[in-house]
Image (spheres, helix red, strand yellow):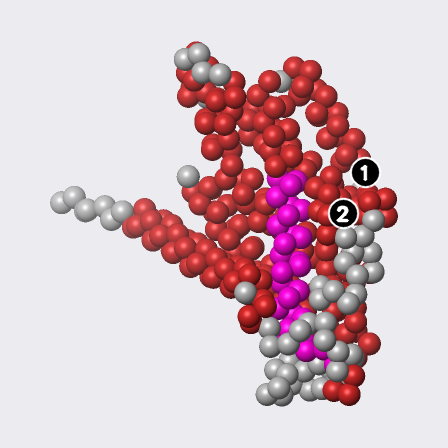
Amino acid sequence: MTTPIMMMPPRRRSSAFLGRVRRSRWAMRVGIAIVVFYLLVAAFAPWLAPYDPLAQDVMNSLAPPSSAHWLGTDGLGRDLLSRLIYGARIDIFLGLGATALALLIGTVLGLLAGYYRGWVDTGLSRLVDMMMAIPAYPLLVLLLFVLGQGTLSIIIAFAVTGWVSYTRLIRGQVLVAREQEYIIAAQLGALGHRRVIVKHLLPNVSAQVIVLWASDIVLAISSIAALGYLGIGIQAPTPEWGVMVAEGQDFLLTNWLLATAPGLVIVFLGVGLALISDSIAGRGTRR
């Protein structure tokens, strides 16, 4: 009598795979919810903030959390919650602006280098090697000293130091994609180079770039906050999270929220963006 064979391992693998898919969807939803919340807070800051973030009330300085000031006040009597809300506008705008410009520059150069090859690829590759030989943060600080302080200077400085990673990633993916049959067919179909790059190459190499961009936003916001903390980036009294941490560190024993709250705000935003990027990367791997 023949004993039936039970195919349990495939079922276990299938169950594990479905579990990863469900966890990925859950992580994506949580990440999107966190990021959307931050974006809504930044967009509606004038209506959400209970006070003017720059208004001083020295007689009410270092007040503990209360019904009037939910998170208390800082050393100059400014409402901490209002400054956190307005800080979202500054840090998110700078993080998105700096990384978006770096993404645009890096994507264009990577597409050109990977598609045309030849002297274009050689020249851009040497430029990338040169940029990678220079430490990013010293170059960033040097650019800020040259360009001056301000939002535009920060965006330009981060774009100049950040486009290299996008160029390398895009170039490598284009070198593989341009040998695929659909690209060869598009080229043989007398489609222009511009159309082949925009309509066929770019959509097929964009997934990993989005993952890199999401993680890069976290690094950019953290770096902007660090520059503000060091006094190199955004300057006081602007309600920027890094500046707020620097201003609150002298009051850690009397009012720890002044330095801790801005740090936690940065951490939660980073968690949301990390969940999104990890979910996108996981989906790309499964495909």
Look at 68% across and 76% down and name the residue there.
80
User: Which class describes the residues within 10 Å of circle 2: few (<14), some (14-19), or many (20+)?
Assistant: some
Look at 47% across and 32% down and name the residue there.
204
* Three-letter code, disc 1: Ile
Q: Position of residue 35 (x, y in %)?
A: 53, 59
User: Which class describes the residues within 10 Å of circle 1: few (<14), some (14-19), or many (20+)?
Assistant: few
Q: Position of residue 151 (x, y in %)?
A: 73, 52
Q: Looking at the image, is 46 positioned above or below residue 191? A: below
Q: Where does label 1 land, which residue?
A: 134
Q: Earlier in the sequence, mark 2 or mark 1?
A: 1
Q: Looking at the image, is 172 positioned above or below residue 237? A: above
Q: Secondary structure at mark 1?
A: loop
Q: Quadrant of residue 159?
A: top right
Q: Looking at the image, is 60 positioned above or below residue 111? A: below
Q: Nearer the viewer, mark 2 or mark 1?
A: 2
Residue furthest toward the left?
Answer: 1
> How far apart are the alpha carbons under marks 2 and 1?
19 Å
Look at 50% across and 60% down and name the residue there.
36
Look at 72% across and 55% down and name the residue there.
224
Q: Front-most of 91 and 209?
A: 91
Report the quarter where the C terminus lies: top left
- Residue 88: within the magenta? yes
Q: Position of residue 248 (x, y in %)?
A: 77, 74
Q: Front-most of 43 and 279?
A: 43
Q: Where does label 2 land, which residue?
A: 153
Residue range highlighted in magenta: 77-103
Q: Front-most of 180 and 69?
A: 69
